[in-house]
Image (tube, rainbow, N blue to C red):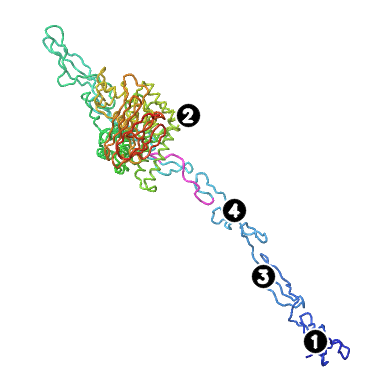
Amino acid sequence: MHGAPNASEYCACGNHGDHYCDTCKVRVSCSGGTATCKDKAICEICEKPYGEKDPTNHVGGKEIRDSKAATCTEDGYTGDTYCKGCNTKLSSGEPIAASGHKDDNKDHSCDVCGAEVGEHIDVDHDHKCDYGCAVAIGDHKAGEGKHTCDYCGAVMSKCSGGTATCKDKAICEICGKPYGEKDSTNHVGGTEIRDSKAATCTENGYEGDIYCKDCGVKLSSGEPIVAFGHTYKDEVTKEATTESAGIRTYTCEKCGDSYTEEIAKLPAKPEPTKPSKPENRVEPTKPSKPENRVEPSKPTEPQRDERLGWTGDTQVFCRAASYNANVSAFFEKWMRDMRDGQRSDGAYPDVAPHSWVGYGQAAWADAGVIVPWTIYLMYDKKKILQDNYASMEKYMEFLSRQKGDGYNYNGAGTNYGDWLSYEDTERRYVSVCYYAYTAQLMAKISEALKTDDCDAYASKAKAYRKLAQEIKKEFQTRYVDADGDLKQKSQTAYLLALKLDLFPTEEARKKGVETLVRKITGNGNRLSTGFVGTAILNQTLSQFGESNTAYDLLLQRNNPSWLYSIDQGATTIWERWDSYTKEKGFGPVSMNSFNHYSYGAVSEWMYRTMGGIDIDETRPGFKHIVLQPIPDNRPEVAAGQERIDWVNASFPSCYGDIKSSWKKENDGTVSYQVTIPANTTATLHLLLPTLDYVVEESGKTAVKAEGVSSVTFMNGKAVLELQSGTYQFVVKKENK
């Protein structure tokens, strides 16, 4: 093996560049190392360059020459590649195309070079640059008398302003052209009365119907004018003598109608005899001014129109009637009469079955809603609500159209108001209150008929509740002063506002109760209400803790009062408190019904408060009974009155007899006996005079009595939940 690690020691010529084998002294060539494009290889033996350069081995690195960046508008060049070691060109580059301008934000300026890009143009006239820069182009406005933009033609406004009438469309305040529809309710051209007829002594007249002069539409129907009856003046036209009879002639001062009666011959003695009465005539009296009713043939008999089914009388007495008899089937039929008589505009008649009497009067027409609700409560007859719901909605639509005088919620007509009241209440006030009442009832009726919270009845319940609130707001604007008091000051005004929750605040409500009681006591503990107010008088007083005042009214003997009529000989309920008095005899014969149940509505209070038998509206038909008897606890009793110290009440519900009785003892102990029918439950409210009174049942503490589910004490009452059965409770002072 040749090797020459120490070649210089064996060099024959003294040349250290030669290589010689250590053993045989043979020369060895240079080897090893790597030639490049720049340098020869370095011998690994002698460490000297040898051989040739390697033009393919470029190890000194590369560099790019002659490159040029592309711009938005000019091409570029990637550059040629050269060897750094030998400067040899290794490869050629490629051209780079111009990038073109870039404007991502559409601001018309190149994002790269800043050059201006694109012009603002709007070929489609949409007020926006078509390039997409969102710059507004052209003013967006309509010229005078135009609804469209002058630049783009877009509709900028609809026709508006002006007032449509029954004759003409509204005139647009912008373009001056008619638009929309005529308003069939806006009659501005004046009205005229047609088909009127004057009443005579014997024939009814007619007020006439009101028509619009512009469109000829009938706006309202008139009312009959009751024949005013003859007013006879008598005159002796032939004196009686002892030989011949005389003649007394009666002549009507209005129409000239006349009749005669014979005056008996004078007796032989010159002293004249009292003339006899005509055989077939009632001795005429000078009649008072008629009050919308036909004169009866006899003042003690109800007239023709008093026998009609007056709707106002019906609604105030309906609940009282239900306590006194099973009237469910009767009122189902009567509501068919109401539907049959309902006018096309939704107004209910004043009488049902409908006769010649008018339509749509507040508290009368409202019976179409009040009566079905009452029968539903008393008998759990949901069918009467279902059968009449469409008709009731039609009536509510009628009420919604009764706008005017700047108000949206005027209620029904004002012919009757608080009928025959001793104190005036604005009739429109009564109408507005009853509108609120029917809206409240329609919300309850809809709620009773709904099957879930998403059906149509649920939606209607919500709408009617909103309507009731809107009426309440307008009522307060209209009839409540800055202090929260009513502008109307009658007993009936306060009763309606309290019953229907129309006061703005609790404080105002309390003051309203105080004012009502003060008005009653200031009137000698006498009422001054008519049909509307009397029906809710005692019940509303008890609702607000004033049962003592209610007892004072019930037992009042001065006019007007229930006992006053009795003291005058009444065995029935009269239309007027003083239809007959022992002092003056019969009242106005033009309207003097002696069998007129309206004021008998007080019997409802006697059942509900004195006896305490009442309804739970959430479980109608007495499925759950509310018993809250309130004894006569007056601290003082007026002269001529006696305290009521016991009550025995019963009601034959569809589940069986409900009984409630109480008796007061001299020591303040009150005993209560109640009977709850099978398949029902009851909540009994017992008054506790003071905190030291306790409740026992059959000698046991009430909480331990069988059938008593629970007993709670609150607000001066013991409230007991009872199962069916008969109970004997005693409220007495606790033995200590």
Q: Is residue 271 left or right of residue 536?
A: left
Circle nearer the N terminus (1, 2):
1
Residues 510 and 104: in front is: 510
Rendered residue at 47%/29% (across/down) = 482
**Which label sits in the foreground, 1 or 3?**
1
- Mark sitting on residue 337: none
Q: Which residue is mark 1?
A: 30
Please, what is the three-letter code of the amino acid marked with disc 2? Ala
Please, what is the three-letter code of the amino acid marked with disc 3? Ile
Q: Give the residues in magenta.
A: 151-168
Q: As displayed, is residue 498 above or below residue 247?
A: below
10 Å neighbourhood of mark 1: few (<14), some, or many (≥20)? Answer: many
- Disc 3 is placed on an element classified as strand
Q: Which residue is mark 3?
A: 96
The residue positioned farthest toward the top in the image shown: 269
Is residue 117 part of the magenta span, yes or no?
no
- Disc 2 is placed on an element classified as loop
Q: Which residue is mark 2?
A: 482
Circle nearer the N terminus (4, 2):
4
Please, what is the three-letter code of the amino acid marked with disc 4? Val
Q: Are marks 1 and 2 in contact (CB under 8 Å)?
A: no
Label 4 and label 1: CA atoms lie apart by: 82 Å
